[in-house]
Amino acid sequence: MSLLLTPYEENGMSLKNRVVMPPMCMYKAESNARITPFHLVHYAARAMGGVGLIIVEASAVEARGRISENDLGIWDDEHVSGHQQLIHLCQTYGAKMGIQLAHAGRKSLCASSTPVAPSAIAFSDTHGYKLPHELTLEEMQSVKKHFVQAALRATYAGYEFLELHAAHGYLLCEFLSPLSNQRTDQYGGSLENRCAFVIEVAQAILDATNDVPLFVRLSADEWMENGWNIEESIYLSKKLQSIGVAMIHVSAGGNSVAQKMPELVPLYQAAYAKVIRESVGIPTIAVGLITTAEEGEKLLQGGFCDLVAYGRELLRNPNFVFYAAQAEGKKALIEPAYLRAF
């Protein structure tokens, strides 16, 4: 039996299919970081197209945590109404809605603020990256509170899932890597110390939001010698599972301009999701140039993951699910208004 278009019912989660639209920054917000008509149309089109779970793009938990000044935010109560409108619109078409809570850390390119990081090490000497301010212990507690307050706003707005962004070289990811985290206090040095802040933030969100499922997105390997790797990702995933994290969204890379990327071929990151799923026993989302229903089905049947993220493909084709349904002879899954096209 094919799995991609079948419901997913696990750990209190209920999705109509296993197709995920992962968070992808659109850089279409104004400087106030609010939802715009673009976002309403962009996400609603994928909801109408049959996507089971939409995770809204990285939304900053504080203004200096934006990647750019055109990012969405959820650090202010004034942001909530736009997210409420977006959620209602997408839920009307059957999509479940999540949001990625994010802090850019040293990768922030905002001209109006100084970036922060675990250590005062710039991401790059080029392309406008600034030398970040090294967070004090007191400031780290303030950042944690920003994550919790953003999570509470998100749940108030109506998001059914939360995702903590600890991948791609942004703030929480920076704490994990020994290359970007060179602290000498209790948050630096050993693997246990480097993982502590991510675990503390996740625990604080879980405590504040009760039963809302929390995902964590990780870069399973940063593709750097002596950097963060899959074995360390397994360790962290076990810790996150033990505190109640529901799923690991498995990506890779992004923490260094010198990273040695593998060849960009279909499914090039999916094996990381399988290793974490099998080693930890926690559900995973796989990513990485997955473009066809057949590829997604292969991953699900092969035990690589529980849900499949289609990023670029859903940018190209908001009706991806309808084409997959047509190929499987499941026309009942196609929006009736569009049936004549299939």
Image (tube, grey):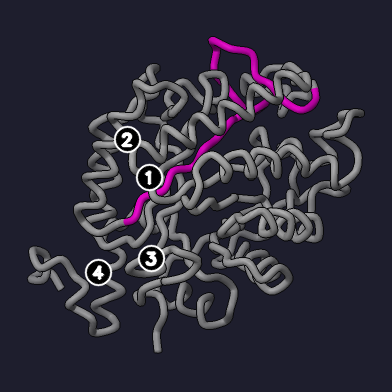
Q: Check contact, mark 1 vs mark 2: CB within 8 A.
A: yes
On residue 14, the disc is 3
Label pair 4/3, CB-CB below 8 angstroms: no
Mark 2: secondary structure: helix
Q: Secondary structure at mark 4?
A: helix
Q: Secondary structure at mark 3?
A: strand
Mark 1 packing: few (<14 Cα in 10 Å), some, or many (20+)?
A: many
Numbered circle sitting on residue 83: 2
- Nearer the camera: disc 1 or disc 4: 1
Badge 1 or badge 2: first in the primary sequence = 2
Q: Identify the residue under disc 1.
A: 159
* Mark 3 crowd level (few <14, some 14–19, many ≥20, 10 Å Cα): some
- Residue 329 drawn at (x, y percent): 23, 84
Q: On screen, 261 above or below 52? A: above
Viewer-side residue, 226 vs 61: 61
Q: CA distance from mark 1 to mark 4?
A: 25 Å
Reading the image, the residue beneath label 4 is 322
Callout 1 touching callout 4 (CB < 8 Å): no
Q: Secondary structure at mark 1?
A: loop
Q: Pick whichever of labels 1 and 4 is earlier in the sequence.
A: 1
- Of the numbered discs 4 and 2, the one sitting upstream in the chain is 2
Q: Answer with mark 3 or mark 2, whichever residue precedes in sequence.
A: 3
Task: Work out whether 200 lies above or below 114.
Answer: below
Q: Is residue 25 above or below residue 275?
A: above
Residue in the picture at 43% in, 28% down? 74
Q: Marks 3 and 1, how far apart in space?
A: 14 Å
Dot 3 and dot 1 residues touching (CB under 8 Å)? no
